[in-house]
Structures are given as structure tokens and as C-alpha cells.
């Protein structure tokens, strides 16, 4: 890598660390190219990105960011997985790690919080933002449907009463 490429890589990683909802760091020694491509495509489909990290450059990129506490994770063959949604990257990484024991999660960060392996696993079990929005919408919608039913019932009863009086008057 030339010096200009390194500078560009550091700048790009710095922006990633600042803008991402969560970043997961993992060792990938022994993962085949086909498996890595599969992992990258799964992450891309979920809305995240996977990059192989050059440790020294990643440590430089971490300086001055909220995620600076995870610099000690960058040892050996490391990759970073990141996404804007804080749940996406941990979820995809943990799903891939279940089927491939060569991918070893080291930790990560979410904003100023440095995450341990257990914290990344916990994040992976949480529902995504879209799932939470769907649940919330369902919870809001159910009472509204009930309210509409309750509000309509008296109107329907009144209409029946008026219809009964109208029939009574016609009969008389």
C-alpha cells in the first residue's frame, strides 16, 4: 500500500468509526474466500459492511473517535463488521459465527461503549429497529381498532332504535 492509499484508508475508517451504530471486531484466520464472500453478501443484504482491517491503520483511525477504547482488539488477522443500525452487524456476525467456527468474535463498540464478546452476543439477540417498529405499530394499532369498534357500537344502537321508532310510526 502506498502512503496516499494508507492515508485514504485511515480517513475512511475514521469516518466509519464515527458514523456507525455498532462495530464488531473478529479474527478470520482460516475462513475461505468463498465463505468470506458469502459473509460479505449476507452483511451487505442486511445493510452492513465487512472490511479486513490493517491493525496499525485501524488503531490510527480509532484515535479521536468514541470507539477509541477498542484499540487493543486489533491483533492478528482482524476484520471489522459495521452498520448504521446497532443491531445489524452483531446479528449477522453471530449468525455467521454459529455456522463457521473459524470466525472468532473479539468484541466491538457501540458509540462510546466498548463491547465484550458477551455484549455482542446479547446485542445479536435483540430485535432490529424494523422489527421493533413493527411491534410498536401493532401495539398502537390494536387499541385504535378497539376504540373504533366501541365508538361505532353506540351509533349502530342509536340507528336501530330510530329504525324501530320509524317502523312503529309507519305501523300506526
Image (spheres, rainbow, N blue to C red):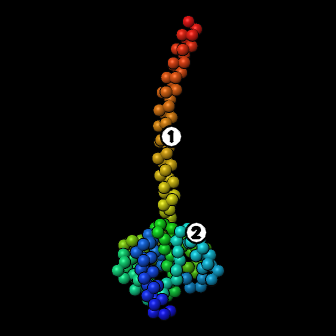
Quadrant for residue 160, please give it. top right
Residue 121, how many percent across, how many down? 49, 70
Within 10 Å of disc 2 (Cα), the crowding (few <14, some 14-19, many 20+) is: few
Identify residue for label 1.
145
Residue at image position (52%, 58%) is: 131
Within 10 Å of disc 1 (Cα), the crowding (few <14, some 14-19, many 20+) is: few
Mark pair 2, 1: CA separation: 35 Å
Identify residue for label 2.
45
Of all residues shown, which one is farthest toward the right? 34
User: CB atoms at circles 2 and 1 under 8 Å apart?
Assistant: no
Residue 128, how many percent across, how many down? 50, 62
The first of marks 2 and 1 along the sequence is 2
Residue 133 in view of the camera:
yes
Res. 46 mark:
none
- Residue 57 sits above or below residue 113 on the image: below
**For this view, does 11 lie left or right of residue 50?**
left
Residue at image position (52%, 86%) is: 77
Element type where label 1 sits in the image: helix
Element type where label 2 sits in the image: helix
Amino acid at each position: 500500500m502506498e502512503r496516499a492509499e494508507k492515508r485514504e484508508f485511515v480517513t475512511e475508517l475514521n469516518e466509519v468509526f464515527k458514523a456507525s451504530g455498532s462495530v464488531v471486531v473478529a479474527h478470520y484466520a482460516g475462513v475461505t474466500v468463498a465463505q468470506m464472500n458469502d459473509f460479505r453478501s449476507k452483511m451487505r443484504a442486511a445493510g452492513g459492511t465487512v472490511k479486513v482491517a490493517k491493525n496499525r491503520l485501524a488503531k490510527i483511525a480509532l484515535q479521536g473517535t468514541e470507539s477509541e477504547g477498542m484499540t487493543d482488539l486489533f491483533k492478528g488477522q482482524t476484520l471489522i463488521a459495521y452498520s448504521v443500525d446497532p443491531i445489524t452487524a452483531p446479528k449477522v456476525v453471530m449468525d455467521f459465527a454459529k455456522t463457521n467456527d473459524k470466525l472468532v468474535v473479539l468484541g466491538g463498540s457501540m458509540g462510546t461503549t466498548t463491547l465484550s464478546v458477551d455484549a455482542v452476543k446479547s446485542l445479536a439477540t435483540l430485535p432490529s429497529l424494523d422489527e421493533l417498529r413493527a411491534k410498536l405499530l401493532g401495539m398502537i394499532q390494536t387499541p385504535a381498532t378497539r376504540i373504533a369498534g366501541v365508538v361505532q357500537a353506540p351509533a349502530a344502537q342509536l340507528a336501530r332504535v330510530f329504525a324501530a321508532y320509524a317502523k312503529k310510526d309507519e305501523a300506526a
